[in-house]
Image (tube, rainbow, N blue to C red):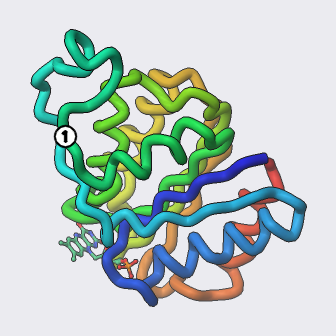
Amino acid sequence: MNILILQGSPRANGNTAWMAEEYKKAAESAGHQVTIVDVAKKKINGCLACEYCHTKGDGACIQKDDMQELHPLMNEAEVLVLAAPIYYFTLCAQIQAPVQRMYCVNKPAKVKKMALLMSSYSPNVYDGAIGEYRGICNYWQVENMGVVTAKVDEQKTDATRQKVIALASKL
Ligand SMILES: Cc1cc2nc3c(=O)[nH]c(=O)nc-3n(C[C@H](O)[C@H](O)[C@H](O)COP(=O)(O)O)c2cc1C
């Protein structure tokens, strides 16, 4: 399958990037094609709610930023994995922006399954993000393959690696 991982942490060697790499390795070893996009390195603005896309734009966004290169990848992906650090009890803004910019086409064209990888400092901070993620899965009518979280003492551990591998094995 064609898998796209949106990695939202600006920290290239951080915990979320590590989880994304572990997922990629596991999925590739099972024969899948995996692309990781470090969306924090991209310039992706929030949606302007101008409705250009739904009126004159015929599905195209009026904003000409790095979402132009991400849109085709989102629309070609069959599996979308969101990898996000928790910022203030929810998905980091770097992940929320590209998801919300899909408003112009409503949903990624080919995505059938999604998964969520998250890291945080504290325990018990994931409910808001998981609720948002589940809402997106329901709205886009895609299968939720599952969620792996890693708080500070679970980061870059073999136990977390095994959870990520188990999640990737559901593909
Ligand atoms: C702006 C900001 C907000 C954060 N908010 C939370 C939070 O609400 N709860 C929490 O447990 N950790 C919070 N953290 C800590 C990160 O979620 C945690 O360090 C995570 O592992 C970072 O992932 P990374 O290593 O991939 O960058 C926050 C960090 C930043 C920079």
Q: Is residue 60 above or below residue 119?
A: above
On whether ligand 1 comes within 8 Å of the CB at mark 1, the answer is no
Q: Is residue 137 above or below residue 82?
A: above
User: Tag 1: residue type?
Assistant: Gln
Q: Which residue is mark 1?
A: 63
Classify residue 72 as left or right of residue 106.
right
Residue at image location 58% in from the left, 61% down from the top:
148
Classify residue 142 as left or right of residue 151.
right
Decide which of 125, 73 is in the foreground and name it: 73
Residue at image location 70% in from the left, 86% down from the top:
158
Count of marks, rendered view? 1
Residue at image location 43% in from the left, 32% down from the top:
136
Rendered image quadrant of residue 25: bottom right
Residue 46 on image: x %, y %:
17, 44
Q: Residues within 10 Å of mark 1 (few under 14, many from 20)?
A: some
Residue at image location 28% in from the left, 59% down from the top:
94
Which quadrant of the frame does ligand 1 lie within?
A: bottom left
Residue 56 on image: x %, y %:
21, 13
Q: Is residue 49 above or below residue 99?
A: above
Residue 57 on image: x %, y %:
26, 19
Q: Residue furthest top?
A: 55
Classify residue 7 as left or right of residue 62.
right
Q: Is residue 82 above or below residue 108?
A: below
Decide which of 98, 166 is in the foreground and name it: 98
Decide which of 19, 33 is in the foreground and name it: 33
Q: Secondary structure at mark 1?
A: loop
Rendered image quadrant of residue 36: bottom right
Classify residue 4 as left or right of residue 6.
right
Residue 64 on image: x %, y %:
22, 45
Decide which of 122, 39 is in the foreground and name it: 39
